[in-house]
Structure formats: structure tokens, C-alpha cells
Image (tube, rainbow, N blue to C red):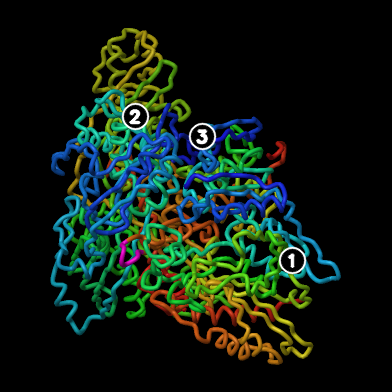
Amino acid sequence: MNPFGYSRASDLQQAVSGIAANPQTKFLGGGTNLIDLMKMGVETPAQLIDITRLPLAQVEELAGGKGLRIGALARNSDVADHPLIQQRYPVLSQAFLAGASPQLRNMATVGGNLMQRTRCYYFYDPAFPACNKRNPGSGCGALEGYNRIHAILGQSDKCIATNPSDMNVALAALDAVVRVQGPKGEREIPIADFHRLPGNTPNVDTNLQADELITAVDLPSIPFATRSHYLKVRDRASYAFAIVSVAAILDLRADGTINEARIALGGVAHKPWRALEAEKKLIGKKADEESFRSAAETALTGAKGHKHNAFKIELAKRSIIRALQTTRALAI
Amino acid sequence: MSEISLTVNGAKRTVKVDDDTPLVWVLRDTLALTGTKYGCGMGVCGSCTILENGKAVRSCQIAASAAKGRTFVTIEGLSKDASHPCQRAWLEEDVAQCGFCQPGMILTACGLLRDHPNPTDEEIDAAMSDSVCRCGTYPRMRKAIRRAAAAPRTQKKP
Amino acid sequence: MSATLIGPARNRVDGRLKVTGAAKYSVEFEVPKCAHGWTVESNIAKGKITAIDTKAAEAAPGILAVLTHLNTPKFKAPPKKDERGGGGIRNEERFPLSDAEVHYAGQYVALVVAETIEQARHAASLVRVSYAPEEPLLTMEAAGKKAEKPKTNHDEHVQIKKGDVDAALKDASLVKIEQTYITPTETHNPIEMSGTIAVWEGDQKLTLFDATQFVKGVQNVLAQAFGLETENVRIICPFVGGAFGCKGAVWMHVFLAAVGAKVARVPVKVHVTRRNMFVGTGHRTPTRQTLSLAATPAGKLQAIKHVSETLTSTVGQFTESCGARSTGLMYESPAIRVEETVYPVNVATPTFMRAPGECPGTYALECALDELAYVLKMDPVALRLANHADNHPTKNVPFSAKHLKEAYQLGAEKFGWAKRNRDPRSMRDGDLLMGWGMATATYPAHKMSAAARVQLRANGTATVQCATHDLGTGAYTAFTQISSEELGLPFENVTFELGKSDFPFGPVAGGSNSTGTVGTAIHEVAGLLHKALAELAVKDSKSPLFNLKTDDIAMVSPGRIGLKTDSARSDAYVDILKRAGKDSIDVQSEKKPPEENKKQAFQSWGAHFCEVKIDPFLPRVQVTRVVSVMNCGRVVSAKTARSQIIGGVVMGIGMALTEETSYDSPTGLPVTRNLADYHVPTNADVPEIDVAFVGEPDFAFNPIGARGMGEIGITGIAAAIANAVYHATGKRIRDLPITPDKLI
């Protein structure tokens, strides 16, 4: 690894002023992704500020029944097992449990998971000369290379990487809000605006500023989110990144028609992909095969495959249908 | 280089290492606790698993500087004579083949049994999918965990 | 040696060391002042290094040496392949850092030696290499003009012609199929990565702690490379954390550790990274195999043609003999043709990986037979029985102790095969499609040379030594068991030692040869021990054997030698030694060429039956049940043998469903180059695996009766799974692995 300085922040202010003072600084949470990237020579921070001692690990009720707040340093495993998360937002608990492995979940934090970087081979291994995300202007190795795990939606000719997180997909479906602290104070970023599409600047993953620290994620109260499900399709039975994943939430009326639906896709784009048009299409429809199929078609409109990943288009459609079927069938 | 103090297997140890050295190398190269294995360096294979407060964690994912002041148990700290219920069950089922992933597997099982003293097959599958074995010891490993779960708890688990 | 099929079910003798973390693997030996080496690799597949800037690396803290092709001392050219004496295997024939040429992506172009591993890793990142790249050959198509058809592979003929294949394939009265099957590059990935600690004493003595399947081979190769006396090179390797073939040859990092230590004048450890395990220690070559079968409507094979194409590198020759090692011997047919073509490409050199040749070969042939069975509307087991070969189909000698028919029968019974509905998509478990498939497994019985040493002590304990290896196979346990039986001592009284080049010769632990080969050496040394004891006894007036001829004396019961014709007249080992005033007695056998029996063919056999379940809408294959029945001669150590078969099946599940090393086409670099992207089976991928053994000890093969166990489990299993997938879905996937995208 590139040699780096290490310090431990004892309060939020210290952490934020520390990063403002030196742009080559990174926050260290669970370290499950950052330490890896440092070993590979992809990330070369001059300074690490260990924030794991900051009091940001709580899961607590928001006043006035407005939802739940998850501290940025809450461990993935603790959130997954939290009774309030399991009761009110099963899709999020399931997404955590589908992600990584138990030990990594014991270490990984919610804030770190939001910042997780792509698993694109060309980004992860500096032996590959071309990667606009790692080295802006160098090209995209995946575009003409081996791209089985890459994006089919929202990609640009500069980058076809995907966001690898399971949690982010569930957060997208739940309209979570990311709370961040910067030198000028606190601000809120809706999850939809938190991650970016690659465009011409794939090196910038998120709209978090370099001097900002994620402090919490707020989950709005969504009473019907109890009827929700996370589906992950992967190459082996466990412990693999998603080829495609779906977070689905359904609000069903007494007559079986759909009052509201939420669909977010993982493994298909540079950010968790919310299928808003497909959701709209479902409102008022019967929660049946035909509606689900039509929503799936809509969700994948404009999808574009590459040499090795064109299968993801059909796979994503099927995954949406299956996720909605499973969600509909839940006994609430 | 920094001096870093941490507690390993009940003893306080102070080591002089590069800040960025992963804990796995501190354990293996500096403290000669080679029961903790190095199999990928990326948190994927699980062979570097150790316990922190009874929870299984990966020592390749913890930089030495971040290990400061923390307390860990390695396979050597479980028992030296294979008397820990998990080690005993492992021997009785003759789980090991090459043995390289086994310390990590055993400590992962300890972490599982601490949270789920009587794990279901699904819980075993989920927890043990954390670690990779190339010899294919999985079927015996599952038996050993069921056996360890059924064993009388005469010994306090770390 | 016992005539029972299955030996005692003992737990492995090294189990305790392995569950307490006390087993010491090679790079775990504590060597004072050991420095660390870190490599720099090329990121082009072909070309020349035009400049290499090491200034920044040399100026970094803790740096002891930076080696490149410009300053690395020259290695001594090895003798020609057949003049290498003591053996040793090199797949990559070039020495590291020997010139400016780049032959494959990932080739080591520099070694940085530093006091700490982090210093070495950081300084390695500061080395700047400039290249003049050339157009690499990366595929069979690109390398087409350079293709070779090797006549032989390790002395065995690989281009086989028997009868008139073409005529049968044109015969309109016969039923025919022709299909092409693809297997990708697979990588061994033992969890212990390769690594070497090199320690020089002066400039003539070298000790290596090396993760290897062949300590004597490393010793010989290193002695030649550095111009040292063989006995001045010592190799130590008491435990190997899995190997599967990738630790059989001497790879570049071994030379680098030794030369790094020589230049830096300190011990040096080079621990290969997981990333480099995908390049620098071999892999299974990708294969393309075309099978053409012709059979009578009753299912009698009239022709099998097996054309296989594989890759090797431009700096080493390796042939994966898919056809010769499957079609060449598995089924009776009047016409057999095997063609093997090897294409040299700018990819790192492949090597043997568990059942090299047999594994991909049986995948293709056993899938083709399943396809033929469907065309013939025949049960796949019945088709195999109809073409069962009592005699070796191309050597025309009988197979020794072949019990394959029993394996089919027992396997089918245990599995419940009779309940199978033959039609694809006909069986379900709830919403899931269910498929049942089967295939034959096979692996030859290999025999090599070995010697052993025994020390028997007056307290009735003994130590047996051989420079063999335990890769996790259970060798310690099996050889303790064989020693106990052959010496006639209680199991607990015998210690078996291995993994040191100081011990008598042991061959490479590969090709499932060790149990039989080293077992035979133990058998011989036990005979020598009994003879040495007899020589003491016949001179001892107090012995019941006094004045008898030693040739008339042998072991008559455990712990006693006596008159062959009257076992009541006997003497105890310990009494003989005590009366002779000896604390111990040492005997060593000689390494000699193995006895060849050309009148029979020796081959192990087996049958796999497996069940898969697949969601038809989101198709990922889950293997839910496997029954494997094996016929491998004597099963010396029941538990460790069973584990070996399970291990082969598990690796076969990976081969069938998830494992693939993919390459980037412009650079030639592997992309799935870590255990997150290269998917080996995890716990949740592996069902219960029911293993049984049939047959009898094969004493015609060796005095132990054992034909070996390490490879056969992986042969055939990928075909059994692919056949089950077809049965479940009606889709025939002819390129592995069968990932969800191929079934959608």
C-alpha cells in the first residue's frame, strides 16, 4: 500500500475539519472496501481518519412517526437484524442479508456501503491501462473488453460500470435520505440524487462533496413497505455480487389492485436504478402476471447490452416479474 | 512504523509495524501466530478469520493502525490441545483435508454458535458461506457444527 | 497387506495440528531476518521491455534489492529434458528476469526485496516499465498457423487410430451424433497460495521452505539452476495447503526467492499473491473438443472420434490430453480416432490440474454419450453397459480388477435411478425443474519410483520416512496405516515423516500415484527390516530362529518374524533388538524403476449420479444430490479416501457451474482474477455427497493393491451435472460453466 497517515477522530467536528484540511484524506469506517482498494493501488489516500469511534451507530425512531434514522456507522449486520427494520422495511433487511458474507456484514457500515465502489475488473486492477473512473481520460476497458457484469441502463461511452451494493437498491426503493455533515453544516441528499450516472465524469461516483461526512440515512415512514421483497440473482448459491437484483414494494388495495408500487434494480447501472415509469404503469392495475410483465418491459425500455451482458435485459425483466409476484404473495 | 498495542489471546502485545500492515501479517509475521492464514488478502476467502468479542472478523481487512487497543482471539487462543467444543467436533468428524482454511472455518463456526447456539441448516449455510474451502470439506463441516452445537457447554466460549 | 477392500476408518493423524493452527506450512517457518520479495508484472502480452526505471523504488525505505533483467545473475541453463536425472518439473521453460522479452501478460519483470512486506509492496508500485508492445496471439484462431499435433504426451501416444472411423461415420445404417464442447480456463486456487522462503548459507548451500508437491524435484531443479551439489540444496515442506497440480512444477517465484536472497544476502520470502496465482502457477488450459459417435440402433458403438484443441504458452509446452485419456480407453468400439492439437499463445503456461486430460475429456465424451442415448432412446446406463470394455480398447489387454459394472449398479440403486422418467422436463419438485444425470469416471493407475527409510526402536516404535507429500490428501494417515500393516506394528507406534528432501526419494505427489508408489516403497523397506531382524536372530543362540536361513524367515504376525513354514517358531522384534544390545535398527530401500506389467491395463473407474434443481424462470442450477461409486483398488484409509472423492466432486461442481478464468482480449490479462470473481463452490453450493467403493484390491498392480484416489472424483462429474441440466430443462449446454445466462 501507499504509505499513509492515520488518525482517529473523537468527534464529528474533528473528523470534518480533518478532511477539509487535506483533500488527500479518506474516512475509514469498516474498511471492507477501502482497504482492498488501497492494497490494489486504486485508492492512494495520504491520510486516513478512522471514524469508527464516532457515536453514529444507532438505529432510532424519528420524531412524529416520520420514520427511522440509521447511523452511518451502524454495521450492516446490526441493521439487518434490527427488529424495527425487519418489521417495517423487510426489503432492506433482506438486501443486507443478500450482500457480501456474515463477517463482512459485521464490519461494513451503512455509510461505507453507500460509498462502495464498482467491482468492474478494469477499475479494480490497475494493471489495466484504460479506466476513466480510475484514471480520467484513459478510456473504458470494459466497453470492448470482458463486460459480463456491466451496465445495461444509464451507461455512457465513458463508463459501463455498475454499483455493486445490495443495500443501495433497497434504499432507492424506500426513498431514503442521506444526511451529511460538511464544514458549513448539515444537509440532506435524497437517495435518488446521491449516486450519479457516469456521463463524462465516471470518476465521480456520488454527489457527496470531498469535505462531507455521511452521518445517517433516514428512512421515511412507508406503512406499506411491510409488503416488500429483495430478490438477488447471482452465479453461485451464496456470496457473490448480483448479476441482477430487484427491490420491490407493493401497496395493494382491498380489491387486489395496486395502489402504489416501488421497483429498484441493482447490478444494471452505475447507480441503483429506480424504475419510475414502470411503477406509474402499475398504479390502479390488477396485481397480476400481465401487469407485472408490462411493468418489466417498461422498466427495461432503452436498455442496451454489450458483448457479454445482453442476457441481463431478459434476466432483469424476469427478476422484476418474480420479485413482484413474491411481494404480492406475502402474507401481511 | 508505529508502536501498536493490542490484546491477542488474553495477552497484551506491543508491536512495531507499518501503519498500513494488515492485522493478518502482524499476527503471522510479527507475533508468529501462523494459525491465522492468509488466503486472498481481500476479505473473500475467510482463512484469516479471528474473533473480536466473540464475533468472527477478517484480519486481512483490519489495518494494524486500526487494531490499536482492540482485543482478538486467534485459533491458538481457542485451545492448544483441541479441547474447545468446535475443535473437538472438527476432529471427531475428521473435517480437515489440507487444513489451510480450517482455523478460519472453526472460528467462523464459533461466531455462529455464539449467536445461534442451535443453528438451523439455513443458518449454518449462511454463516459458513463466509469462507472458501477448496478441498471440499463442507459436508463434514456442517456435521461438525451440528455436533458442536449438541455438545455440553463445559467450557466458556471465547 | 490386507486383502479387504476397505481399510480402517481412522481420523487423520495430523488433524489435531490442523485444528489448533499448529501445522506449519512452508512460508510460516520462522527464519530470522527474513526479508520480503514483491513482484512487478508486465501488463502487455507480448513485446519488449524498452526501459525500466527502478530509481524511486531503490530510494524507498527498507529496500535491499531491486532485480530486473538488467542486473539479475544468470541462471544455469537446464540440461535437456531427458537428461535431468533426479527429475523435477518445469512447465515454463524460461528463467525469470532473463531478458527483455515479454511472452505473456502478468510475466514477472522485476522483484523488489525489502525489510518489510509493506515496504516491498510499496516500492514495487514505484517501478516504471516501458514496453514496445507487439501483437500477441491470444486465441486458437490467432495461433492457428503455429498449431502442433504432439505425437506423445509423457510417453503415451495421443494421436490414436484404430479401425476405420470415417467409414462408420458415413454409414447410413448407423445412428450418429457430432457435437463440440467447450471448457474454459480453470484455475486451481488452493487456499494456501504458493510461496517460498530461500535461505543461503555461504554461496554453496541453499535451503528452501517451499509449498510444493515435489520436494526432490525442486531440489534437483534449483541445484541445476544455481550450479550446486544436489545435497547442498534442501527443500522443506511438511504441510501443503492444497495444490491440485499447481505446486507440481517449479514456477518462477521459486527462482526469484532464491536469486533475491543471493543478491540481497538475506533470507527472502516470496509469497505469491492470489492475483498472481491466476498467472504464475499454471492453470487448466481451455479446451475445444468435437465428438463424433456412430452406433448401431441397438446402441453398440461403431466409431468414436475425439478431436481436441487446447492451448499452451510460447515459453512452455503442456498438452491436456483430453481424447487419449478418455476416448482412448473408456469404451469398446471397432473404430477409435483421437486427434490432439495444441496452440501456443501469449498466455502464461498451463499445467496439470486435477486429472489433466481425463477431466475435460470425460466431460465431453460423457456428454456426447448422453446425447447419443437420447437419440437411441436408450437409458444412459444401459448404453454404457452395452459398450463396456473388458479389455483396453486400443492396447488390447485386459483391465485388471475392473468393477465398473458394479459401480453402475450400486450407484443406480443408491440413487434410485430406476424411478427416472427419461423425458426432459418431465420431473419436478414443486415449481422447480428436476433433472437426473449420470456419467462414468475414470483415471489411470500410475506407478513411479520411491524409496523409504525405517528406524525400528527397541521400545517397539518406528519412524518411517520418505520425501513424499501430504497435500491434504491424507498421505500422513495412509502411510502410517500402510507402515503399521507392513512393518507389523500398532498404528500408534508408527510415525510417518515426509516433506523433506533429506528423506529417501519420493516422486511428485500427482497423478494419484503416491499411495501405490510410496506404499510399495514401504512394503519393500518393511521386507528389508524383517530381513535385517532375521540376520540378527539367526546369529543369536537365544533366539528360536537361531541358525535358520534368513530366506526362510518372514513376518508371521504383528511384531514377530518367524519361520515361513512354521509360524509358531518365531521371535519378537523388540526381543531381538534387546538381546543384540541395540537401541534401534535403521534400514533403507533403494529407488528403482517400477515393475511394469504389460499384460494387463490398470485403470480406476467409477460412476456419478446426480440430481439438479432449477427454477425455470430464473435458472440457476443447484446440485441437490450426488452418489459416487468408485472402483480404485484397495481403499487404504477409509475416511481420507472418501474425503478425496468428495473433494473431486466438489471441484467438479465448480467446473460444471461456476468456474471460469476470463481474459481481456486486447491485453491478455485475466479479469476474473480473485476469489470474488472466480467462483469456487461455497458451502451453499455443495449438497451431501454419498460415496461408496466397490471392487477388490488390485494386487496385480502393486503389493498395496491401491490404484490411487486423488483425481478420479473430478472426472465425469461435470458431464453428470450437464446431463442432469439437460434432463431438467431440455437445454443442452455445451460450454462450461453452466451459468444462469446460458439457461435463460
* B146 over C199 or under it: above or below: below
Q: In the rendered image, which residue does mark 3 sit on? A: C17
Q: Quadrant of residue B16?
A: top right
Mark closer to the chain start, 3 or 2? 3
- Name the subunit of mark 1: A
Q: CA distance from mark 1 to mark 3?
A: 42 Å
Q: Nearer the viewer, residue C571 or C443?
A: C443
Magenta stretch, overall SS: loop
Please indicate whether residue C103 sits to the left or right of residue A148 in the image: left
**Does A300 sit above or below residue C610?**
below
Q: Which residue is mark 1?
A: A86
Q: Is residue C645 left or right of residue B52?
A: left
Q: Residues within 10 Å of mark 3 (few under 14, many from 20)?
A: some
The residue at which mark 2 appears reads as C199
Amino acid type, mark 2: Val
Q: Amino acid at mark 3?
A: Leu
